[in-house]
Image (tube, rainbow, N blue to C red):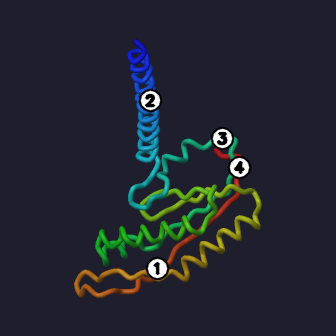
């Protein structure tokens, strides 16, 4: 009978729809798994910057400029304001760095209080412009942390060091 043929066609269409949905879900799941793996391997969970391991993925033929930043007296700040407060400070500092660079530049947490920024340029003027933007953003930044004994907000003053170089070839 005709209704059976229509019924078979309807089932076939539903099965195809389910199959498409399954494939779409499976692909989305796989993409999420790969992204999670990459994120766990290369993304620092505290600062949301790249981990130092990312440097191993750079092609030997890459041409980058490198900016190196170090927060001075890290131990003193950490000891004075406790570790949890330092985390807040470090997160804010990292955000300033990320907001100061261009989309294709890479901010990498190199060590506890050290950052490397890979700048996608060989042009000294462009590099110095980015460095000046970083300096201005850091200098105008105000952060307050809770003093552990008094529980009052204290304006944190700090110094930092910055070096930079242009590399013709990454090695």
* Numbered tag placed on residue 60 in the rendering: 3
In this picture, is 147 found above or below 119?
below
- Residue under the image location 76 percent in, 67 percent down: 125
**Furthest-front residue in this view:** 1
* Numbered tag placed on residue 63 in the rendering: 4
Tags 4 and 1 touching, CB below 8 Å: no
In this picture, is 119 found above or below 24?
below
Tags 3 and 2 touching, CB below 8 Å: no
Q: Nearer the viewer, mark 2 or mark 4?
A: 2
Is label 2 in a helix, a strand or a loop? helix
Residue 94 as seen in the image, left or right of residue 60 = left
- Residue under the image location 71 percent in, 46 percent down: 169
Give the distance between the C-alpha atoms of the residues marked 3 and 4, in whole angstroms. Answer: 9 Å
Q: Earlier in the sequence, mark 4 or mark 1?
A: 4
Tell me the crowding category of disc 3: few under 14, some 14 to 19, or many 20 or more residues within 10 angstroms, Cα based: few
Q: Earlier in the sequence, mark 1 or mark 2?
A: 2
Give the distance between the C-alpha atoms of the residues marked 3 and 2, in whole angstroms. Answer: 47 Å
- Residue under the image location 29 percent in, 87 percent down: 152
In this picture, is 98 found above or below 10?
below
Give the residue number, with chain letter if any, for mark 2: 17
Q: Nearer the viewer, residue 111 or 38?
A: 38
The quarter of the image holding the C terminus is: top right
Q: Nearer the viewer, residue 12 or 76?
A: 12
- How far from the left and from the top, in percent, is residue 170? 66, 46
The quarter holding residue 151 reads bottom left
């Amino acid at each position: 009978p005709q209704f059976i043929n229509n019924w078979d066609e309807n089932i076939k269409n539903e099965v195809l729809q389910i199959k498409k949905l399954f494939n779409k879900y499976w692909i989305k799941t796989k993409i999420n798994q790969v992204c999670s793996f990459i994120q766990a391997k290369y993304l620092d969970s505290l600062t949301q910057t790249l981990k130092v391991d990312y440097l191993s993925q750079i092609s030997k033929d890459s041409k980058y400029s490198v900016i190196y930043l170090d927060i001075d007296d890290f131990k003193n700040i950490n000891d004075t304001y406790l570790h949890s407060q330092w985390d807040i400070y470090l997160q804010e500092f990292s955000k300033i760095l990320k907001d100061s660079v261009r989309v294709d530049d890479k901010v990498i947490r190199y060590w506890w209080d050290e950052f490397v920024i890979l700048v996608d340029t060989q042009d000294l003027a462009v590099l110095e412009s980015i460095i000046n933007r970083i300096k201005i953003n850091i200098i105008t930044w105000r952060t307050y942390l809770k003093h552990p004994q008094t529980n009052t907000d204290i304006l944190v003053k700090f110094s930092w060091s910055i070096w930079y170089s242009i590399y013709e070839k990454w090695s």
